[in-house]
Amino acid sequence: MQPIHELLARIRWDPDFGRGEFELEFFDRLEVSLIRLSLRDIVFTPEDHFFFHYLDEDEYEHSVPFHRVKAVYRNGERIWQRK
């Protein structure tokens, strides 16, 4: 299985592969459920190799560790999942 950071780098840097609508699905411990977010709504900080960040509907920033990512979707089709 390809590590999540390698897949995200390919989405970012491979112009052919990176076309499309991507979503990350991750486990939220507070909601105790899976949450699916568009990659457009996620912020990656270059110096932070362990977390990504997003704002909820109340503009509260959440930090999510990469190990909680369970699946990645491209145009609605799952292209990656963690076992």
Image (cartoon, grey):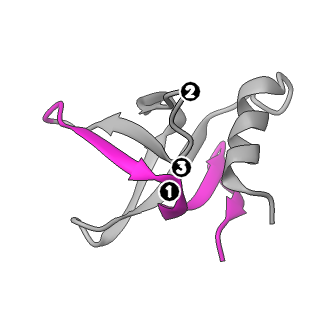
The amino acid type, in three-letter code, at marker 1 is: Glu
- Gap between marks 3 and 2, in whole Å? 18 Å
Labels 1 and 3 touching (C-beta < 8 A): yes
Number of dots carrying numbers: 3
Please name the amino acid that badge 3 sits on. Leu
Q: Is residue 17 left or right of residue 29?
A: right
Q: How far is the residue under mark 2 from the one under mark 1?
A: 21 Å
Dividing the picture into quadrants, the one containing residue 2 is bottom right
Picture quarter with the N terminus: bottom right
**The disc label shown at residue 46, or none:** 2
Q: Secondary structure at mark 2?
A: loop
Q: Are marks 2 and 1 in contact (CB under 8 Å)?
A: no
Residue 49 picture quarter? top right
Distance from the alpha carbon under mark 1 to that under mark 3: 4 Å
Say which residue appears at 52% left-offset and 54% top-offset: 66
Mark identifier at residue 25: 1
Is residue 63 rendered magenta in the image? Answer: yes
Task: Specify which label sits upstream in the sequence, 2 or 1.
Answer: 1
**How many residues crowd around disc 1 within 10 Å: few (fewer than 14), some, or many (20 or more)?**
some
| Magenta range | 58-83
The residue tagged 3 is: 24
| Horizontal side, residue 61 vs residue 39: left or right | left
Give the answer, above or below, for where 27 lies relative to 41. below
Prevailing SS of the magenta stretch: strand
Is residue 12 shown left or right of residue 60? right
First in sequence: mark 3 vs mark 2: 3
Where on the picture, by quarter, is residue 35? Answer: bottom left
Q: Which mark is residue 83?
A: none
| Residue depicted at 38% across the width and 38% down the height | 53
Residue occupying the point 13% across, 35% down:
58
